Image (cartoon, rainbow, N blue to C red):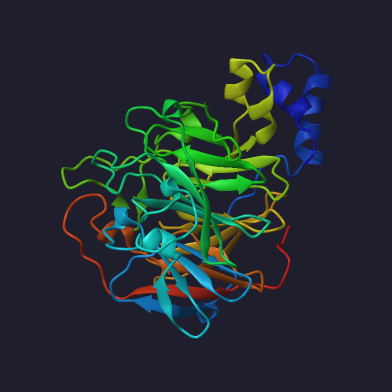
Amino acid sequence: MPDTAPCRRFFKRPAPRRLGVLATALACLVLSPQAWALHMPKDSELGPQALTPFLQSPDHIWDTVLPLPDGRMVLEAPAWLGNHGPQLYIHTPDGATVPWPAALSDTTQDTGVQPDSTGPLIAAAGLTRTAQGSLWVLDSGVPQREQPAKAAPRLIEIDPARNAVVRSVRIQADALQPGSILSGVAVHDNTAYVPDSGVGAILVVDLETGVTRRFLDRHPALVATRPIMTPQGPLHHPDGGLVAVDSSMIAVSPDGSWIVVQAPGGYLSRIDTAIFNDPHITPAAFEESVTQWFKTPSLGGLVIDADGTLYWSDLTTGSIQSYTTGRIPRRLITDERLRWPTTPGLDGKGHLYVTASQVDHSGAFGGAPSMNWPVTLYQLTLPTTAPAR
């Protein structure tokens, strides 16, 4: 990215009086075309033939899909969407879909891990895979957003090669606020980044020690300042109030140098991770360190590729869009079959997978469920051409 500091200084100054200042501003616009993001294209690059049904369920609502290198696929069916029973499943190439792993779905088995690592998930709320191959799942302990927590939140590491839970890391209670509901997780090396979707903030967890620190508490970029927009309009509770969910979507760059985060109805923000370990940063600098990265629509989920490209699901239009590190947006596909698409997954072989989860018909925000079964997981064949500039 180009150095935009002179531009920022210009727009913070009083009205310019000298031609030189005006020239500086024009230079920012002419010489730094990538300083600001381009608009999302209105037309899709791909036609409906690129989107094909991959898997269906007559009784589970999946909200996250995570393909594994060996061809298996991990599926999250969280309690908050009205699912019952196990909340993680594995889909194998032979077509079987079964609860997984045993330590989180069957407490009668001897898993060989510490007691607080065993037992079924209370409230699956995020799933990610590290560069080293481990899976981390967030258990928020809050199966229903309008009800009190049933357990303390924890991060659980799973070894997919052994189909086994490796360890469990409890989130420290003093990092939570009354009303905290953790949702989403991103992991780089031994650090986890977890948004608080109940009281907007970022929790930074040392996975070796369990030490949890809370940052950017109630920062405007992390709270629900905009409504969640569906194709029918703003999402409401049955009592008429707007549904408000704070920051719940997060991804970390491949090198761990930055994260992106947003509330479902908010805008995408980028934060350099160095600030979380800078002992000299001032509170004001901390607040200003959050950069609005793109004016996204209401999102159902996002994922990051190995090259830093972001892919997200636009629930307002039923679209899958991407956004490069060079801030080039692409509308890959818009399809009426994508009814509230949730967190997508990438297989590294040119495909993206996403579920049409119909969250607004699940009963998750009150009211009677009105799901159109079965729930369908789709495969999208990604374009092989580079983004246009």
Place of residue 27 in the rendered image (x, y in percent of width and height, measured from the top left): 81, 33
Q: Nearer the viewer, residue 28 or 250?
A: 250
Left or right: where 16 falls relative to 107: right
Place of residue 42 in the rendered image (x, y in percent of width and height, measured from the top left): 54, 60
- The residue that appears at 52% across and 62% down in the rendered structure is 164
Left or right: where 310 falls relative to 20: left
Tell me: residue 183, above or below residue 107: above
Q: Nearer the viewer, residue 68 or 190?
A: 190
- Residue 268 visible to an observer of this rendering: no
Tell me: residue 312, above or below residue 351: above
Q: Nearer the viewer, residue 344 or 323?
A: 344
Dividing the image into 4 quarters, which one contains the C terminus? bottom right
Place of residue 273 in the rendered image (x, y in percent of width and height, measured from the top left): 66, 35
Left or right: where 225 falls relative to 274: left
- Residue 366 visible to an observer of this rendering: yes
Place of residue 224 in the rendered image (x, y in percent of width and height, measured from the top left): 39, 36
- The residue that appears at 76% across and 32% down in the rendered structure is 4
Figure quadrant of residue 315: bottom left
- The residue that appears at 36% across and 64% down in the rendered structure is 357
Dividing the image into 4 quarters, which one contains the N terminus? top right
The furthest residue to the bottom? 94
Figure quadrant of residue 55: bottom left
Count of picture labels: 0
Left or right: where 159 falls relative to 273: left
- The residue that appears at 70% across and 73% down in the rendered structure is 384
Figure quadrant of residue 61: bottom left
